[in-house]
Amino acid sequence: KMRHTHVSNRKSTRRLSTAAIGQGLVMKTYDILWKQNPRAIQSLFWVVFVFLFTWVSTNGQGDGGASLAMAGDIRGLFSNYMSIGSKSDWWNFMETVFIPLIYQATWYNNDPLGQSDQGLYNLEYDIFGNIAIRQLRVRNDSCEIRYKFNGSAPECYGDYSSSAEDVRAYGPIDSTTNLPSFRYQTSKSLGCVAGCYISAVNGIYPISGFSETLPSPDIDLFNTTTLNAANAKIESLKAGRWIDRGTRVLFVDFSVYNYPTNILAAVSLSLEMPAAGGVVPFISVLTIRAENLWPTARSASLLAAESVLFILLMAYTLLSLREWRNVGSRAYWSHGWSYVDWVNYALLYTAFAIRFATFGSAATLQFPPGPTDRVFFSNVGSLVELWKNLLGLNAVLTYFKLFQYFGYLPFMSYLIDVLSASFESVLAFMVCFFVAYMGFTLAFFLSYATNLDRYSTIKKTTISLYRILLGDADWDDVMTYNHLLGPFYLITFTLLANFVLVNMFVAIIMAGYDKVREKNAQEKKISEFVIENLLIPLRRRVLGGSLLKRASAAMRRSRDNLYGETGA
């Protein structure tokens, strides 16, 4: 028994001494870090902030591969849509491709579908709600006739705009109401509450207009009658000349859901009809994780992380406000990091506001909707995409601010010091570069806007010239459509931009690098900094200081007490 007591006391002594050394090591590390840099605590908490931000962002995006595969599959099934070249092609697509694909009744070998397989688009996705086909129109006086013609002036249908939109009913007279059959419906009447806009190639359009519905191919309603009703609806609209000269954009909107991945997709087939002629088809597939709209128990940890992230954001905002008050406006705004901070805070608060608005909008939608319900998941899906885009912008600023909080470390401040030393020269260079770049942008735009899509607008031309800087030059097309000026433009631009301006920029940065290197000639390496500022002080204070002495004294007292009890 006495031997057992002796062994137990010795183990307890070891545990106490180990705990004392560990606690002392943590405290000494805290003292060293705090004395070396008063902002150390803020820096450590910013690391926590970055970690939570990264976790929330990656979980908010989810499995990008599944979303990409789903969107690619849907676009592939409607690949014929992108070859539409006229209004008649659109009607042919709806009759021969869209209706048979959506209202699928047989397997690939013509065996009839079973009861559990009916109503599934491509046998993979459940179609939620009904299918809406919609158009936006313009008035016949929406553009100006600039010359006087003999006889009556022709009707003029301009490009779509909210001021030129035509909301008047038209079409065959309904025998029951004695009114035109095709009537305008607002976004609210269509069931859209917030974010009621949708993008196409040439613009952003409201979710409103002249809308018609096709019956849902849901499992509860699917039969030959539903298929015949969908065909009859298309034939009726075609016979009533639903599309005419006033039509400027068409939409086919529906939503599908994939059960294994819990991903919802808002699909929109748009067909723009510019006033200049032709049609512009586009397939929009907006994939949404259902958990981003309707949180579940599995997403509780993500919501908790977002809550902690918001609390930390508020804390850093208050710290910045206190610093602003203490140093004054002039001193506070003289530092570039102050602008970075507040842009970062503003974007983060905006992202949180959109996040809350998404939950509010999703709460007004029925999920899953009934087979006869008209739902627009594209509006809440657009809010989710906007939220993720803002997180993307914040990711750059959030990680970049690590240079601010750990700027007291020599190797972390090097990049900022080089950019600061080169700032004035870089600014002057950017002015010169912008002048030359815009001159060539205008030259390419004027020479090729009517022949090449890459230069059809100033925006596209600017991007195309940047691609030329990266080596993606379309030599054949440029010389085909302007064999005199084309080679001159390309050779002159590449020589000036790639060989002169880019090398000037590199020289300016290298000059700033030399200044910083001369200024910090005695700067320590990373390993030297860690050894001299952390490891050596810790060794002196822990291994050779009072902490070890106190631990040894505690062990001696424990041993003396043990031997005293044993002797007694």
Image: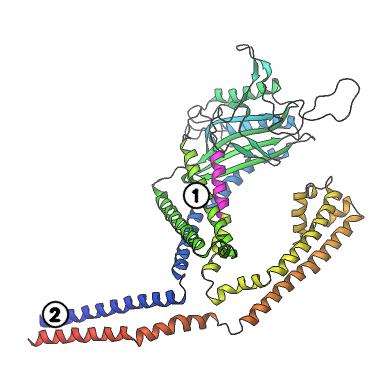
Give the quarter of the figure containing the N terminus.
bottom left
Residue corresponding to mark 2: 5
Residue drawn 80% across the image and 64% down it: 497
Q: In this view, does 118 lie to the left or right of 278?
A: left
Q: Which residue is drawn at 54% across and 53% down?
A: 346
The one of 40 and 560 positioned closer to us in this rendering: 40
Is residue 101 visible to us here? no
Left or right: residue 551 compared with residue 498: left
Where residue 168 appears, x then y in whole percent?
67, 22
* Residue 217 in picture, x, y percent from top left: 54, 30
User: 64 or 183: nearer the eye?
Assistant: 183
The residue wearing badge 1 is 352
Q: Residue 442: percent from the left, percent from the top?
A: 82, 52
Q: Left or right: where does residue 482 sit relative to residue 166?
A: right
Between marks 2 and 1, how big is the CA–CA gap? 60 Å
Q: Is mark 2 on a helix, strand or loop?
A: helix
Type of amino acid at the residue the image marks with label 2: Thr
What residue is shown at x 72% (from left), y 69% (from top)? Answer: 425
Does the stretch in magenta take in 546?
no
**Image quadrant in which the C terminus is located:** bottom left
Q: Does the magenta stretch include residue 375?
A: yes
Task: Mark 1: give few (<14), some (14-19) or many (20+) Cα within 10 Å.
Answer: some
Q: Nearer the viewer, mark 2 or mark 1?
A: 1
Magenta region, residue range: 367-391
